[in-house]
Amino acid sequence: MQSCRSERIGAPAETVGGAPDAGTGKVSPLAAAMPDRPRVLIVKVSSLGDVVHNMPLVHDLRARWPHCEIDWVVEEGYADLVRLLPQVRRVVPFALRRWRKGLFNGQVWRELGEFRQALREDAYDAIVETQGLLKTAVVSRIARRRHGAPVIGLANATEGSGYEPAARLFYTAPVGVGVHTHSVQRSRLLGAALTGRAPVDPPRFFGEEALALHVNDPLWSDLPARYAVGFHATAGASKRWPLQNWHDLGRRLFAEGLALMLPWGNDAERHMAERIALGVPGARVLPRFSVMQGFGLINRAELVVGVDTGLVHIAAALCRPTVEIYTATWRWKTEGYWSDRIANVGDDGASPGVDEVHAATRRVRGLEPEG
């Protein structure tokens, strides 16, 4: 199981209103009611980064109950990602966006029936719903539970989250968290309400399979021996890092022997990648690839640097030398805090300069500062 051992392992944000106290010796009522081999359903459907940050919950449950049977409801596009966790017995794909577009399609109704049947196939001893949305809260109550089994969910929003207060009506055991609780810690605290054990750092994410996934994919057969990946693309324009900054950073990395590889996901992002490549010697615009193929690109890279986006969070979870650039989102929400191989620069409304980012790229590679 992949984890990042480091002296820097403390969660960076507030803890919780209702978290268990590991030092009291008390067993939580929810944990006391669990069988030795509980069956637990996790509901976390999206987004890419949030799904990755939810993975430590699986390890926390298994640490408490080594033979715990865990199922996970997740958006169909992220199902293969969750399947990288050998501790997850069954992945239940969720496709609400696609289903909504085909309500007059018989195949959609068959899929909805199969989805409901999958949720009712087994009686769960507990359900942990970490999304905090009305749609996922409803899913948590559709699932079959044994008598008295808790439905655990968020009692409140964290600052800037998409939490929907109506979701709380569907939980039997809502858990309050601090308004500045990190994404990883938030889901772990919901699990802690069930296990009765405070989360232990560092968090663990993927299984060993992820370290070699797609490393030998033919798509990556002609990559240079030494390269950095620049994840420049993000859904929000305000989260982007300026073009000139990418040019300046890319030139500095090239001078250090690293070619800059530039991914993209749509035509606009490809255009930006091409503009970056024009100003950086040795830079290359990559072919389009899937999230799963991205593991191979990341694992072979000497450095990953990018804005606040899902593939950068995957790199941090894999403990690759990673620099996360924040420009228009709060760093405390998603920053990688579990390893010295990860550096977080900038913050909401405080876009970092090239010098700061470049210094961070050297630090995560274990290089001395310039000068």
Image (cartoon, rainbow, N blue to C red):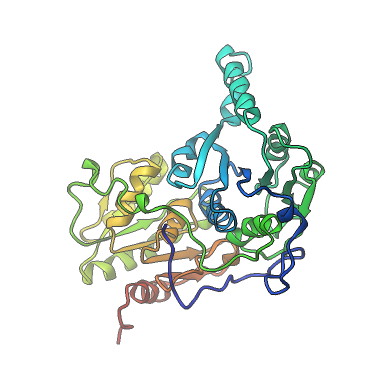
Residue located farthest toward the right when viewing the structure as drawn: 169
Q: Residue at x 33, y 83 (%)?
A: 369
The reply to whether residue 343 is in sight is: yes
Q: How many marks?
A: 0
Residue 82 place in picture, x, y as percent: 48, 44
Residue 251 lies, with reference to residue 157, above or below; the image says below
**339 lies left or right of 119:** left
Residue located farthest toward the front when viewing the structure as drawn: 36
Q: Residue at x 61, y 17 (%)?
A: 109
Residue 181 place in picture, x, y as percent: 66, 64
Say which of 289 and 112 sits in front. 112
**148 lies left or right of 322:** right
Residue 169 place in picture, x, y as percent: 82, 43
Quarter the C terminus occupies: bottom left
Say which of 29 and 93 sits in front. 29
Q: Residue at x 63, y 18 (%)?
A: 103
Quarter the N terminus occupies: bottom left
The reply to whether residue 263 is in sight is: no
Residue 126 place in picture, x, y as percent: 69, 44
**252 lies left or right of 84:** left
**229 lies left or right of 74:** left
Q: Residue at x 35, y 47 (%)?
A: 294
Quadrant of residue 167 within the rendered picture? top right
Say which of 139 and 282 sits in front. 139
